[in-house]
Image (tube, helix red, strand yellow):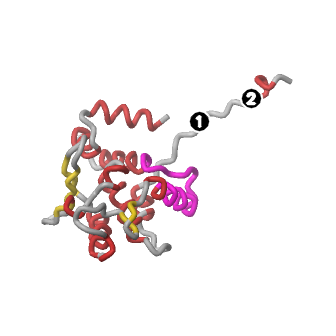
Amino acid sequence: MDRATSVVYRPMMPRFIPSSAQCIALSSFEDRPDAALFNAAFGLLYGTGMYLNEMLLLRPIDVAFAERMRLLISGFRARTLPVPTGAADRLALLLGNESAGTEDASIFQKNGKTIVDMTVLKELKRRSRLFGFPNELGTTDLRIAFARDMAEKATPFEIIAHMMGYRSVNQLQAFLMRSAS
């Protein structure tokens, strides 16, 4: 039999996107010595919808403490993001740690070295397996979960798009459509 005729059609299963409770649980681990670092990172990725590279570049001077914690994101997609309570608590814990660095250094450093995106992805995949999720998660899955949860809370799509760094609702919709396939 020809190799081409032996191919079995398998329909694509929709990608698993964790629920709000599962995303919160992902950022609530204490099983590693640097748990505060990863708990804050995952809390911010899911809680704000920010890009991984934006999170990795955050400095203590980018965090505004007032009635509610806010992040000042600079660069190409400059904006101010509110931080939900759980993620704010995790970030405050990390910032209270004396090894968090100086005002000019990234918050997400360990022993003076910035965590690279592969370290965050590796830990996210490990936690996905530990939870028994049907597929390993990536940071994009946390952004999708953020958008879905905000939409379920009746947040206008214009606000969701702005928080995620998109210039328009059309860009957000295109991202969500690409992510669904």
In the picture of the structure, the residue carrying the numbered disc 1 is: 12
In this view of the protein, which residue sits in the foreground, 143 or 123? 123
Sequence-wise, which precedes: disc 2 or disc 1?
2
Residue sitting at the far left = 66
In this view of the protein, which residue sits in the foreground, 20 or 95? 95
Q: Position of residue 68 (x, y in %)?
A: 17, 63
Viewed as shown, does residue 64 lie left or right of 171? left
Q: Position of residue 181 (x, y in %)?
A: 49, 34
Q: Amino acid at mark 1?
A: Met
| Alpha carbons under labels 2 and 1: distance apart | 15 Å
Q: Main secondary structure of the magenta part?
A: helix
Kind of element beneath mark 1:
loop
Viewed as shown, does residue 1 lie left or right of 38? right
Which image quadrant is residue 30 in? bottom left
- Labels in figure, total: 2
At label 2, counting other C-alpha atoms closer than 10 Å, the crowd grade (few under 14, some 14-19, many 20 or more) is few
